[in-house]
Amino acid sequence: MSTRNGLGAFVLLCSLILITGAVSTRAAYAEDDVRCSNGAFVDREARCKFFVHFAPRDSDTKDARILAAFGHNASQIRSIALVVGVSKYSSSFEKGSLPAAHADVERLKTFLVNQQFDEIIVLEDEAATQETISYFLSKYVVTEANAFEGRARVLFAFSGHGVPDGAGSALALSSAQTTSDVRGLYRLRALQGDLQTAAAASWQTLGLIDACYGGDIFGVGFVGGNPNDYHDKGAYVITAGSKGSLTWTIDKGGSVFFQALIDGIENGTANSFPVQVVDPNNPKSLINYGGVVTQGQAFAEATRVILDVQAGVIKAEVNPAALSPPWEGSVMPDSASTGAFFFLANTPTTKAVPIAEIAPKIDPREFSGQGQKTQTQLHSYVVRGIDVSHYSGQVDWQKVAASGIDFAYVKATQGTTLIDPMLQRNLDALHIASLPHGVYLTYDFCQNPDLEVENLLRIVPYGTDMLPIALDLEWFEGSGINTPSSFRMQMKCANADITLTRNNVLRVLQRLTVAYGRAPIIFLPSVSRNLLDTRFDAYPRWTADYSHGSNEAGRPRDLIWTIWQYSDRGVISGVTGPTDVDVFAGDQKAFALFLKGHH
């Protein structure tokens, strides 16, 4: 990622924010509204010049990811951005001019076009007045959203100075003569109210604020909701720092916050969710629409970059103690958001692919069943990992990473509806800790395999630090007097038609291969090897074998394996109580290939 080694010298900054919305017919507008040459309706002609991009209202939304997120067979979702940047200030203004704000505006304009926003409104310097900002947020956007019957995505962005004030912190506008000049300040309380008005009329709203003291907006906001559920209505604000904190720019290159945020989305360092559907014209084929980066994933990536600056991983001419990680909170004062904003990941759409033709590509550097033959003791393995679920409680992943653990798998889903309650916290913390990690789907042999895949796709991202998805088939166990009744039911479902069971498992593996661009790994106890036939040989194996003989020999009973779970009684710093512990079959170079999808 370019922010890791390209931040350059830092100087003190103060602010940035964004918005998106919708509109449809002349009847939705006031009779005295003016129609701009681009088709926009505003209350006065002088506002027409602020539109730098405007798509025809009667054009359908082209990107299937936006339509799939909204659902309800919608053909039009209006995305509107309001970008406010103040780089020029009066010579009497104490904090001086801020060239980085203009750089932020220029990059945001390009970014938002690539994100397929329908309308991009830019207010810079003298054009950014209290009245104009409030008009576009609380009146124009609301009218647009109403015209599209609420099918609007609203993004608001401000870049400029922020100032503390006894009456409430504020964003400093170009007309401000001093930091206490109320005529040139847009108070955060006023911004909060305008965002709430926009959010009430829209499907999704997001404010991004990179300004000194911008975090003070949370004095009148409430934290809550799910910032990774991009299917539902939501309204949030993300600020570059905490309450009362300063923020930083990169000379004339823009702000640290926006560089981290946009780089993460465009370069793929932020995790993303795959968007995949079964072809409605051919149920045996899949269409992969690329991915989306949720608000929560973008927030986590910006947090990781700031923490890396603080830790000295990213070198910068700044006092790390002066930096604060971003903050996130709900726009609405009395309720949490069930959903949140999202961005389009830089991943390609693929044509319909016959599921039966999907298979992993065998790499000539295959090491499964080879490297481990030279091992005679468990401590000889150089790549070690753990796997956890919500039963492990709250894991301190920084301590886990510091203890020498090289990778981790966390439980994601079970069957068609269950989601591990610790999943999102684990994923965010693992990403920030820069610990390679993956997730596992606990397969239910009694449920619909396609619905099990879709349950996973909805909440598990694709990311460059993500290991191949693991398909957990441990419920295919032998029956006996000590076997839990739930396992016996699973065995009954699996053996009712073993051919169908194998085909269903293979279909799940094939769908996951398309969605995440790499072959999944199959988790299976050694005693259950008879579930798989030769069609599964192309997939890497994760075997569970706790037997005394295997531990003594330094290898499991299976001859071919990639990961070996050798105990469920491991003691690891950062994990409360015993946990599953694993070793990887190869060395660090082989593990790097596994992380990229080779096995």
Image (cartoon, helix red, strand yellow):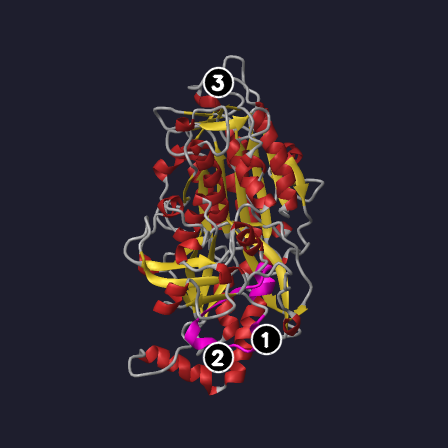
- Secondary structure beneath disc 1? helix
Quarter of the image for the C terminus: give it: bottom right
- Disc 1 to disc 2, C-alpha distance: 13 Å
Q: Residue 581, position in %: x, y?
A: 38, 58
Instruction: Give the label on residue 530, or none.
Output: 2
Q: Residue 383, position in %: x, y?
A: 46, 52
Looking at the image, residue 361 sits to the left or right of residue 204; the answer is right
Residue type at mark 3 is Lys
Residue type at mark 1 is Arg
* Of the two numbered discs 1 and 3 in the rendering, the one whose residue sits closer to the viewer: 1
Residue in the picture at 44% in, 63% down: 564
Residue ID for mark 1: 535
Quadrant of the image occupied by residue 191: top left
Looking at the image, residue 213 sits to the left or right of residue 122; the answer is left
Span of residues in magenta: 512-537
Instruction: Give the label on residue 95, or none.
Output: 3
